């Protein structure tokens, strides 16, 4: 039974990674993978009640993550339809290439920590098209560095990357603990490749026209941006105060945003009011991504239920031995294999009893899984988004960016391990 389910998982995962050649959305493959693995487990298992019990134990963990993502995406969409992000992008008026690269990279780094790396990549890609409308080669380089910045920025925040969010929701890391431990390694992960790339850049861009025509008022844009970002930042505070699951804090934010926008547009005609409503924002949410996470988390949960991940952990411990090396290699692997199932698998392989809250294992995993995806353009949600928007070729990225990303990844890992050794001594 275990061998068959592993084969099903591998085949399903191949279908996910070959999404473009097969022309089948990865959400389809993930949903079918999640259901088929559990179906095989139910039909071939010796005890149906045990299968049902394991599935019921897994569902709350999955639902926590899905509800959290739904709330976060809704708030981001509300900011976007109110043109709130233009408040930020219109302030970037520099023309020197090095200055622009530095500013957009640092901006992406900190935006990613508050929003998430995927949203940040999309917003910054839109910005780059306005700053660099003609020089495609420069724009591709800038966009690629933004991938590194967005992934590094997401790693040190509990809401910046879905894998860090998974570890936070799963009580492997605390909000304050992950910020304190990973902000320096993440900065190093960005600044090493950024400074190297800046040393090769010369010249300036032509002055661009700043957007002055909007569908919303200045007050509406600023209010929704500030309120939305505040709601996102409040989520870890809400969890700390109430000890409720993070999705409750996120839904509180959605409720506040919904109420505020209803009041803000209450006197407008119905059609205009609908364009800026939360219901309209919900219709723009990437539901396929949420369904993809459900499928992949369900499938990985099935591997955990049948004991496959426990066996994998034993194999790694016996062959590699050193946990730091194992996690470092998992980070590199995340550039090829989606980091969501990798982190989900590690969470099943090593228990909270073995490694309690804020252990080095979980913090280092958050760093490696969050930043390792930058090694290849297909290795992260941010990278895939930029690849689609700018039509970046896989091998162009390998030739121009992979080495830079790897140097940053290694440098950040060394900083984290050195920092841990200095502060904890082990």
Image: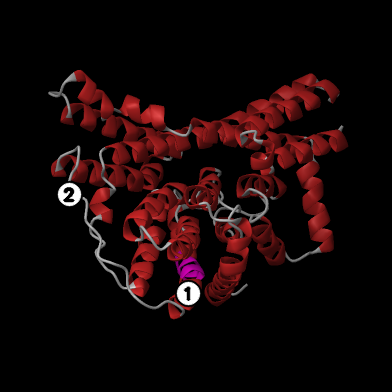
In percent of the image, x 56 and y 50: which residue is there? Answer: 172
Local crowd at mark 1 within 10 Å, few (<14), some, or many (≥20)? some
Q: Which residues are magenta?
A: 183-190
Residue 212's tag is 2
Query: Measured along the vertical axis of the image, is residue 88 above or below residue 77?
Result: below
User: Which comes before the other along the chain, label 2 or label 1?
Assistant: 1
Q: Element under label 2?
A: loop
Query: Was residue 185 drawn as part of the magenta stretch in this picture?
Result: yes
Query: Measured along the vertical axis of the image, is residue 134 above or below residue 215?
Result: below
Gap in angstroms between the C-alphas marked 2 and 1: 32 Å
How far from the left and from the top, in percent, is residue 247? 44, 36
In percent of the image, x 61 and y 46: which residue is there? Answer: 340
**Image quarter hosting the N terminus:** top right
Query: Measured along the vertical axis of the image, is residue 87 above or below residue 13?
Result: below
Residue 266 placement, left or right of 346: left
Q: Element under label 1?
A: helix
How far from the left and from the top, in percent, is residue 167? 55, 48
**Image quarter hosting the C terminus:** bottom right
Residue 305 placement, left or right of 150: right
- The answer to whether marks 2 and 1 mark residues whose Cβ atoms lie closer than 8 Å is no
How far from the left and from the top, in percent, is residue 38? 74, 27
How far from the left and from the top, in percent, is residue 47? 82, 22
In percent of the image, x 53 and y 32: which residue is there? Answer: 288
**From where the camera sits, is residue 283 visible?**
yes
Choose mark 2 or mark 1, whichever is in front: 2
What secondary structure is the magenta-colored segment mainly? helix
In percent of the image, x 49 and y 52: which residue is there? Answer: 386
Residue 228's tag is none
Q: Quadrant of residue 341?
A: top right
Residue at label 1? 197
């Amino acid at each position: 039974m275990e061998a068959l389910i592993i084969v099903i998982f591998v085949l399903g995962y191949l279908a996910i990674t070959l999404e473009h050649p097969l022309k089948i959305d990865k959400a389809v493959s993930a949903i079918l993978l999640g259901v088929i693995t559990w179906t095989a487990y139910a039909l071939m298992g010796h005890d149906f009640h045990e299968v049902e019990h394991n599935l019921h134990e897994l569902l709350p963990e999955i639902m926590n993550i899905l509800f959290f993502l739904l709330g976060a995406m809704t708030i981001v969409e509300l900011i976007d339809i109110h043109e709130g992000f233009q408040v930020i992008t219109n302030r970037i008026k520099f023309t020197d290439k090095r200055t622009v690269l530095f500013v957009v990279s640092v901006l992406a780094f900190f935006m990613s920590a508050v929003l998430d790396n995927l949203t940040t990549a999309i917003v910054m890609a839109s910005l780059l098209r306005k700053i660099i409308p003609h020089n495609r080669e420069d724009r591709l380089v800038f966009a690629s560095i933004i991938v590194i910045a967005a992934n590094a920025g997401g790693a040190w925040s509990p809401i910046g990357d879905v894998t860090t969010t998974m570890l936070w929701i799963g009580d492997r890391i605390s909000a304050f603990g992950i910020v304190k431990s990973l902000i320096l390694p993440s900065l190093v992960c960005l600044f090493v490749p950024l400074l190297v790339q800046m040393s090769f850049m010369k010249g300036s861009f032509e002055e661009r026209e700043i957007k002055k025509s909007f569908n919303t008022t200045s007050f509406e844009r600023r209010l929704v941006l500030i309120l939305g970002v505040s709601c996102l930042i409040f989520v870890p505070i809400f969890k700390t105060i109430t000890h409720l699951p993070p999705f409750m804090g996120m839904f509180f934010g959605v409720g506040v945003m919904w109420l505020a926008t209803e009041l803000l547009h209450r006197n407008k005609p119905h059609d205009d009011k609908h364009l800026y409503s939360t219901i309209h924002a919900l219709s723009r949410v990437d539901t396929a991504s949420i369904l993809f996470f459900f499928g992949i988390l369900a499938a990985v949960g099935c591997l955990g239920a049948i004991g496959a991940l426990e066996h994998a952990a034993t194999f790694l411990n016996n062959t590699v031995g050193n946990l730091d090396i194992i996690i470092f290699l998992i980070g590199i692997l995340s550039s090829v294999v989606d980091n969501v199932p990798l982190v989900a698998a590690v969470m099943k392989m090593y228990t909270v009893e073995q490694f309690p809250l804020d252990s080095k294992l979980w913090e280092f995993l958050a760093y490696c899984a969050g930043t390792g995806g930058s090694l290849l353009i297909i290795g992260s949600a941010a990278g895939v988004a930029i690849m689609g928007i700018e039509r970046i070729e896989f091998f162009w990225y390998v030739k121009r960016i992979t080495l830079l990303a790897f140097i940053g990844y290694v440098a950040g890992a060394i900083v984290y391990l050195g920092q841990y050794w200095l502060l904890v001594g082990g």
